[in-house]
Image (cartoon, rainbow, N blue to C red):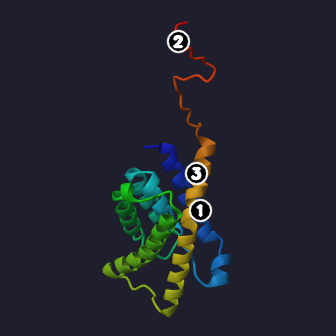
């Protein structure tokens, strides 16, 4: 487990939550707010391990709920279930493939708002749902699908700049001369 990985992911989650709540230009232009935490959860569940999934679900979910109209803690369970499900089968997932990143970003961005609304209904809340909700859901799915591969590229560059490059040491020296024969 790499603690630097988890710290960078939590900083990214904090920045995502902050920018989603402060900058409303995209929301004013399109009429829907996108949520990038499910896409970040896909990256976290494939690279950071279960402690990273738990940390992002709790910190990201509580931070998102604190700055939205959701009751506090309602986004934690959907994020955790998405991350745990992907982490559970991550050995079978081709995480380096662009197609797999898009598919899992699509699935996470599709399931997170849907399960949050189901959880709101289960707790007795009455969320505002109408035909405009389908447009908002579509915008969230498209944004999450498009951003998931970008998270993989961005964090790869961040880790390359923060970590030492791997050095493979071999016993063979290229300047060594091998003599064959008697002498």
Reading the image, the residue beneath label 1 is 150
Q: Measured from the top left, where is residue 163 in percent x and y?
A: 58, 40
Q: CA distance from mark 1 to mark 3?
A: 10 Å
Reading the image, the residue beneath label 2 is 181
Q: Measured from the top left, where is residue 8 in percent x and y?
A: 55, 50
The extreme bottom residue here reads: 131
**Position of 53 relative to 77 (above/below):** above
Say which residue appears at 43% left-offset and 52% top-offset: 52
Residue 17 visible from this viewpoint: no
Q: CA distance from mark 3 to mark 2?
A: 49 Å
Q: Residues within 10 Å of mark 1 (few under 14, many from 20)?
A: some
**Answer yes or no: do the residues labelled 1 and 3 have beta carbons within 8 Å?**
no
Say which residue appears at 64% left-offset and 20% top-offset: 175
Reading the image, the residue beneath label 3 is 156
Labels 2, 1: front one = 2
Mark 2 secondary-structure assignment = loop
Mark 3 secondary-structure assignment = helix
Question: Upstream in the sequence, badge 3 or badge 2?
Answer: 3
**Position of 131 relative to 97 (above/below):** below
Q: Measured from the top left, where is residue 139 in percent x and y?
A: 56, 80
Question: Upstream in the sequence, badge 1 or badge 3?
Answer: 1
**Closer-to-camera residue (123/19):** 19
Image quadrant where one finds the N terminus: top left
Q: CA distance from mark 2 to mark 1?
A: 57 Å
Asked whether, in this view, residue 172 is left or right of residue 114, the answer is right
Say which residue appears at 47% left-offset and 43% top-offset: 2
Asked whether, in this view, residue 175 is left or right of residue 137, the answer is right
Labels 3, 2: front one = 2
Mark 1 secondary-structure assignment = helix
Image quadrant where one finds the C terminus: top right
Q: Count numbered badges in the picture.
A: 3
**Closer-to-camera residue (9/150):** 150
């Amino acid at each position: 487990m790499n603690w630097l990985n988890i710290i960078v992911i939590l900083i990214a989650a904090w920045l995502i939550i902050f920018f989603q709540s402060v900058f409303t230009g995209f929301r004013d232009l399109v009429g829907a707010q996108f949520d990038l935490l499910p896409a970040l959860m896909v990256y976290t569940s494939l690279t950071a391990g279960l402690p990273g999934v738990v940390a992002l679900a709790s910190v990201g979910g509580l931070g998102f709920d604190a700055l939205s109209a959701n009751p506090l803690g309602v986004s934690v369970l959907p994020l955790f279930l998405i991350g745990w499900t992907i982490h559970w089968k991550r050995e079978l997932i081709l995480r380096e493939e662009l197609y797999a990143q898009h598919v899992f970003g699509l699935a996470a961005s599709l399931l997170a708002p849907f399960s949050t609304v189901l959880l709101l209904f289960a707790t007795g809340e009455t969320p505002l749902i109408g035909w405009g909700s389908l447009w908002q859901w579509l915008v969230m799915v498209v944004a999450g699908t498009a951003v998931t591969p970008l998270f993989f590229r961005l964090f790869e560059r961040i880790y390359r700049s923060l970590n030492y490059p791997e050095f493979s040491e071999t016993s063979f020296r290229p300047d060594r001369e091998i003599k064959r024969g008697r002498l």
